[in-house]
Amino acid sequence: MPAEPHLPGPCAALHPLHALAARRRLARALCAALLAAAALSPAQGQTGAAGRDGIEVGAQSRVSRLVSAEQLERDAAAQYRKLLAEAAAQQALGKDSHPQVQRLRRIAARIVLHASRFNPRAPQWKWEVNLIGSRQVNAFCMPGGKIAFFTGILDTLKLTDDEVATVMAHEVAHALREHGRERAAKSAIAQGVTLGASVLSQLLGYGDLGGLLAQTGAKFTMLSFSRGDETEADLVAMDLAARAGFDPRAGVKLWEKMTALGRNQPPQWMSTHPSHDTRIHEIRRNLGKVMPLYAQAIGRPVASLGPYRSNFGEPVR
Ligand SMILES: [Zn+2]
C-alpha cells in the first residue's frame, strides 16, 4: 500500500498559470450563472424563507451574528488555499483537466445555481471545487463555497452523479445555512474567547490542515454538527439536488452504501453524522416535496419517473 496519496487516472501537467486562469474562468462562469439565477428568481434570497415549494427552512440562528460572515469566509478561503497548496506539493491535487475534477465542477455548477434560495450572500461567494487524492471517505464545503472531495469517497462508494450531487449538496447546505458560523459563535461563548481570525479557524476545525497530507494516517479535522443541523442539511440537499436535476432518491442509496461500508470500517464522513436509518426515514418522508422539483428540472411528469437505479442494491422507488 502506498503511504502517500495520489490521484489515479490521467493528470496532465498544467502550468500553474493555466490552472489559475482555468480556476478564474470557472469562478466567472459560476458567478455569471448565479447572477442569472438571481435575476430570474425575484422571490429568492430571503433568509429563512426558501419559497413556496420544496423544502422550507427556519430563520438563521441569531447567535451566529456574533461572528462576522465576511471574516469567517476570508479565513476559510485562506485555509482552503493552504490545503490546496499542500495537496499540490504532494502531487495530490486534481488538475483542472482531470475527468473527475471536471465531473465534480459540472455537478457543482448545477447545484450552485439554486444556492441563493438558502443564503442571500451565496451569489457573492467565489465558489471553488477541487479533488484531493486521499483514501479518506470524505468531502466538505467551507463557509464561502470552498468545496473539496477526496478521491476516497468517489472510489470507495462508487458514487453515481446523483449520489455525488447528494453528498455535495449536503456539504453546500451546511455552508449556506451557516451551521459552521453558528457553531463558531456558540463555541466562542462557551469558551469565553475573543473572536479573531485565528480563533475562528480553530473553532471551525480547519486549524490542523497543515499536517493533513504530510503524515500517514493523519485525519482531517471535521466540524461535528448537531443532529438538527445534519437533518436540515439532508433536507436542503434534497431540494438543491432536485432543482439541479439530480434524483433526490439518491440520498437513500447513499446511506445504504454508507451502511454497507460501515460494517467493516466506518468512514469518517459517516462517523461525524447521525444514524442512517433515521436519515433514510427522513429523506423518504420528504421525497414528496422534492420529486416534483426533480421532475420539472428534467422536463418529465412525476408519474413517468421510474425507480432510482444505482450500482448497488435494489432500485429505490
Ligand atoms: Zn453533515
Image (cartoon, rainbow, N blue to C red):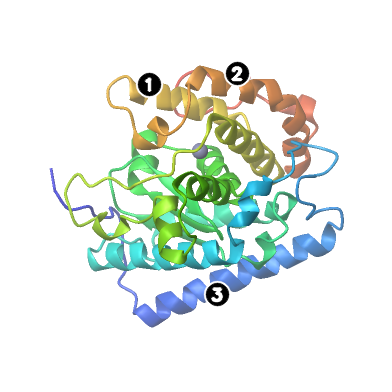
Residue 96 visible at all: no
Q: Is residue 141 above or below residue 80?
A: above
Give the residue pinned by disc 2: 281
Q: Is residue 30 left or right of residue 256?
A: right
Residue 176 or residue 194, whichever sits in front: 194
What residue sits right under mark 1 in the picture? Answer: 260
Within-10-Å neighbours for mark 1: few <14, some 14–19, many 20+ = some
Number of marks in the image? 3
The quadrant of the picture occupied by the N terminus is top left
- Spatial separation of the CA atoms under disc 1 and disc 2: 17 Å
Determine if the C-beta at disc 2 is less than 8 A from ligand 1.
no
29 lies above or below 165? below
Task: For the residues labelled 3 and 1, say whether their Cβ atoms are less than 8 Å apart.
Answer: no
Other-residue count near label 2 (Cα within 10 Å), few / some / many at <14 / 14–19 / ≥20: few
Tag shown at residue 203: none
x 32%, y 68%: residue: 85
Three-letter amino acid code at the position of disc 3: Arg
Ligand 1 within 8 Å of disc 3? The answer is no
> Which one is closest to the eye, mark 3 or mark 2?
2
Element under disc 3? helix
Q: Which residue is mark 3?
A: 25
**Circles 1 and 2: CB atoms closer than 8 Å:** no
Seen from this angle, which residue lies furthest bottom? 17
What residue lies at 52% left-to-right and 75% top-to-bottom?
24
Q: Please, what secondary structure does the residue beneath circle 2 have?
A: helix
Looking at marks 3 and 2 on the same chain, the residue that comes earlier in the sequence is marked by 3
Q: Residues within 10 Å of mark 3 (few under 14, many from 20)?
A: few
At x 38%, y 43%, the residue is 138
Q: Position of residue 203 (x, y in %)?
A: 43, 51
